[in-house]
Image (cartoon, grey):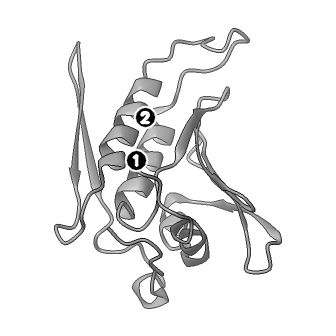
């Protein structure tokens, strides 16, 4: 596992990396099955499978799950969150996973003084909040393809200490 990897900008310049995962979803009456194709040269940490299971569990939340009329979690938000995590599994530590009342998913990393949040919305938009090199806050609205190209954001997350699995 890579502890403090830096993602080389030459990998991500104009289009998502070739190793970006392919996500195929199959749903039966009882079970949601995901098939991810991830670059074989990456070591998949244990936290990744646990995180995907947590994300799948969020899809089971019924309308009003928060007691205040929250929307069910959107498949679009789910797909984008899984795709992001599957693109960089060996470079980043495990996130905290939080459902949003609008039907989105937020991935969070908090290790003081660094706080990073990525919110995946049902409308396919993505908002990222993270510090720049001077610890000034940055807020960006991105598409999933732009997020996979966001070297500065991935480097901030990758610089956080890995949690024990």
Q: Position of residue 67 (x, y in %)?
A: 69, 8
* Labelled pair 1, 2 in contact (Cβ < 8 Å): yes
Query: Real-space Cα distance between discs 1 and 2?
Result: 8 Å
Instruction: Look at 56% across and 65% down and name the residue there.
Output: 160
Instruction: Look at 46% across and 80% down and name the residue there.
Output: 7
Q: Position of residue 121 (x, y in %)?
A: 60, 41
Compared to residue 56, the image places residue 96 above or below, namely below
Q: For the residue carrying disc 2, how many other residues have a C-alpha within 10 Å: few (<14), some (14-19), or many (20+)?
A: many
Q: Which residue is label 1 attached to?
A: 82
Q: Position of residue 12 (x, y in %)?
A: 45, 81
Q: Earlier in the sequence, mark 1 or mark 2?
A: 2
Q: Quadrant of the N terminus?
A: bottom left
Instruction: Look at 56% across and 59% down and name the residue there.
Output: 143
Q: Secondary structure at mark 1?
A: helix
Q: Residue furthest left?
A: 40
Q: Which of the two residues, 92 or 100, is positioned nearer the viewer here?
A: 92
Q: Secondary structure at mark 2?
A: helix
In the visual, does 46 lie left or right of 133? left
Compared to residue 53, the image places residue 11 above or below, namely below
Compared to residue 89, the image places residue 136 above or below, namely below
In the visual, does 26 lie left or right of 144? left
In the visual, does 8 lie left or right of 43? right
Q: Mark number for residue 99?
A: none
Q: Which residue is label 2 attached to?
A: 55
Q: Position of residue 54 (x, y in %)?
A: 42, 32
């Amino acid at each position: 596992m890579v502890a403090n990897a830096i993602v080389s900008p030459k990998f991500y310049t104009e289009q998502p990396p070739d190793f970006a995962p392919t996500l195929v979803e199959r749903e039966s009456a009882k079970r949601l099955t995901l098939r991810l194709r991830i670059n074989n040269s990456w070591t998949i940490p244990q936290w990744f499978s646990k995180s995907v299971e947590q994300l799948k569990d969020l899809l089971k939340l019924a309308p009003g799950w928060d007691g205040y009329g929250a929307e069910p979690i959107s498949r679009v938000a789910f797909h984008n969150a899984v795709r992001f995590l599957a693109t960089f599994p060996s470079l980043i530590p495990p996130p905290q996973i939080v459902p949003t009342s609008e039907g989105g998913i937020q991935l969070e990393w908090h290790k003081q003084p660094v706080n990073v949040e990525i919110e995946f919305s049902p409308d396919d938009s993505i908002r990222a909040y993270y510090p720049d090199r001077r610890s000034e806050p940055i807020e960006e609205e991105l598409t999933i393809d732009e997020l996979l190209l966001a070297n500065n954001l991935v480097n901030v997350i990758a610089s956080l200490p890995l949690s024990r699995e």
